Amino acid sequence: MDLVVAKPEGLYCTAGDFYIDPWKPVPHAVITHAHSDHARPGHGHYLAHTHSEGTLRTRLGKITLQTLPYGEAIEHNGVKISLHPAGHVLGSAQVRLAHGGRVWVASGDYKLEDDGTCTPFEPVRCDTFITESTFGLPIYRWSSPAALSLEINNWWRGNADAGRTSVLFCYAFGKAQRILYGADASIGAIVVHGAVEPLNAVYRAAGVALAPTLRVSDEAVNPQLLKRALVLAPPSAQGTPWMKRFGNYADAFASGWMQLRGLRRRRGVDRGFVMSDHADWPSLQKAIKATGAERVFVTHGSVATMVRWLTENGLAAQSFKTEYGDDDVADIPTSSANVEPLSVEPANAEPANIESNGQDAAQTPKAASNS
């Protein structure tokens, strides 16, 4: 019997009688990270990495939580469990399971680039690897974190010099903190939505150096300050009365899906920044190869494409049907997130149908009444 199987409640470790990121309430759950599609309420007992404690308690309230540092192993019903860096967000972990001479690794969500806000991904050797494939298509290739921060800072500086607020929509957990880590606070003040600041506090408590932030409600936040400010807000704030306080502003959206021209237009923003906390196409290939696994299960994203590519490259590959989405899928309509191309480009293909990051459409400021 396989060490991990898909059940209606989630991914189930058969020998250990526990689940990994289950989507229905179970007695024992190992959690890879605190995004809401992987960490849900109602479980009897949670096991997660030490740095996930703050985000899990912030999001789930009072739970029975056991934490482990990276690399430390415990045993449950004869299965040896250890957590290893996934590089996705603060506290994100791959789950290594060892039993009866077999080693499986469930990666959760991951990325390979070190963005400075969480422990970088470390490959874990195994027989069977469970991988995501959110951006499992050859068109998805990310810029370096440093290049992306420079791009955002230059956009912000240009708006500030023109006397208008820069509003950047981004996921409150993960992307917002990456932006703050690379932000040039000499340009102006950074103002954050109420959904962002509690998560900033968790990162700061874990020792992550973030640029200073203000809440919109802080006394220091006035129209003069906002003319040079960078405002970070979740996608749900777009088009709401909350935006009216910013007058004429320029806006942007940070997501991996911004690599697609059509989705930038549909978001109705002045600028799109290609930012994802998930592995791009080359990184997925690199990560899977580094595990040495001969079997690979694909959980969510471009599943059919990734399974086909893995099979063509000599691996035993199949899929697990799950209820995972991701922070990027939460940014856009689900129907767009799961569109598969008619054909698969070769692995060395150049990205297609992609605007250059510096070639975005109009940079005209927006009046809040029109948003």
Image: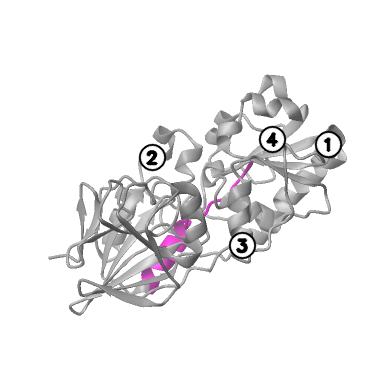
Q: Secondary structure at mark 3?
A: helix
Q: Is residue 102 above or below residue 345?
A: below
Among numbered discs 1 and 3, the one appearing first in the sequence? 3
Q: Is residue 168 above or below residue 285?
A: above
Q: In 3D space, how far apart are the residues under numbered discs 1 and 3 (Cα atoms)?
A: 30 Å
Measuring from the top left, give residue 114's x and y in whole percent: 57, 66
> Dot 2 corresponds to which residue?
338
> Dot 4 corresponds to which residue?
251
Range shown magenta: 272-290
Frontmost of labels 1 and 2 is 1
> Dot 1 corresponds to which residue?
227
Q: Which mark is residue 205?
A: 3
Frontmost of labels 1 and 4 is 1
Among numbered discs 4 and 3, the one appearing first in the sequence? 3
> Quadrant of the rendered structure where residue 104 is?
bottom left
> Quadrant of the rendered structure where residue 165 is?
top right
Q: Are marks 1 and 2 in contact (CB under 8 Å)?
A: no
Measuring from the top left, give residue 263's x and y in whole percent: 53, 35
Q: Secondary structure at mark 1?
A: loop
Q: Is 246 on the left or on the right of 139, as rendered?
A: right
Q: Are marks 3 and 2 in contact (CB under 8 Å)?
A: no
> What residue is drawn where x is 53% and y is 47%?
256
Kind of residue at disc 1: Lys
Q: In 3D space, how far apart are the residues under numbered discs 1 and 4 (Cα atoms)?
A: 13 Å
Kind of residue at disc 3: Ala
Q: How many marks?
A: 4
Among numbered discs 4 and 2, the one appearing first in the sequence? 4
Q: Secondary structure at mark 2?
A: loop
Mark 3, other Cα within 10 Å: few <14 / some 14–19 / many ≥20:
few
Mark 1, other Cα within 10 Å: few <14 / some 14–19 / many ≥20:
many
Q: Are marks 4 and 3 in contact (CB under 8 Å)?
A: no
The answer to whether residue 88 is visible is no
